[in-house]
Amino acid sequence: MLDKQGIAIAVMMAVAIVYFSNANYLLLILVFYALALMVTKYEYKRKKDQGIYEHERSWENVLSNGLVPTMLAVASPYIGSGAFIGAVSAITADKFASELGVFDKTPLSLENLKPVKPGTSGAVSVLGFVVSLMGGCFIGVATMFIFNKTANEAIIIAVIGLAGSVVDSLFGVLEEKGFGTKGTTNMICSITGGLLGYFR
């Protein structure tokens, strides 16, 4: 799923995470990658027909999704795990929304609430909200086993993921107008999750 440059950067991030924090942080990132692979492959033929299937991810995608969580993992001995977990929840929720939400035939643009083509940046749908929260829930449950979080904390983590995904969609409106790229909106999503996770 990653090109050669993407693999190289992912490996460097993994080494940094383990060296500066611990293996639990890497394990949660691996949970994200496994979930991302699952939802990307889901109904990939339908996505190909819609022209929205991405088989191989570039180094830009790895950086836009992984840089902020990596930095927060490195900083975790000083700021705790909350920011890192929030960032991972946000990028997971956004991944679920972008890969599964496209099957909703009635997405609406956040700019004017008019119907747009599935897969359009800055658009939302009922299915998108549901699967986005589902992605956050997966991370919340994972943290119960990896970081010994409580059920209540897992719920908060799931909501943080949904919030990050919504912010991604808001900035997606600007992306559609030529301000920024998918990479910048992904990074803003992870920053939002990190901030909410830190101040929760």
Image (spheres, rainbow, N blue to C red):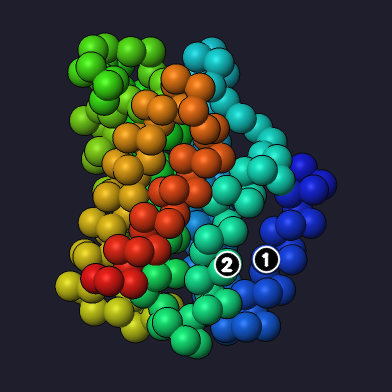
Residue 187, given in percent of the width and then of the height, sits at 50, 49
Query: What residue do we see at 38% from left, 13% from top?
Result: 117
Confirm whether residue 62 shows in the render. Answer: yes
Query: What residue do we see at 23% from left, 12% from top?
Result: 114
| Label number found at residue 182 | none
Is 185 on the left-hand or right-hand side of 193? Answer: right
Q: Is residue 180 above or below residue 39?
A: above
Q: Residue lying farthest right?
A: 4
Task: Specify the amino acid type for callout 2.
Answer: Thr
Query: Can you tell which quarter of the image residue 23 is in?
Result: bottom right
Quadrant the C terminus occupies: bottom left
**Which comes sooner in the sequence, label 2 or label 1?**
1
Query: What residue do we see at 50% from left, 87% from top?
Result: 77
Give the structural element (helix, strand or loop) at label 2.
helix
Query: What residue do we see at 49% from left, 28% from top?
Result: 179
Is 186 on the left-hand or right-hand side of 112? Answer: right
Closer to us: 187 or 9: 187
**Disc 2 packing (10 Å; few <14; some 14–19; many ≥20):** many
Q: Is residue 50 above or below residue 38?
A: above
Task: Specify the amino acid type for callout 1.
Answer: Met
| Label number found at residue 70 | 2
Give the structural element (helix, strand or loop) at label 1.
helix
Q: Is residue 195 above or below residue 111?
A: below
| Label number found at residue 13 | 1
Tags 2 and 1 touching, CB below 8 Å: yes
Residue 186, given in percent of the width and then of the height, sits at 48, 44
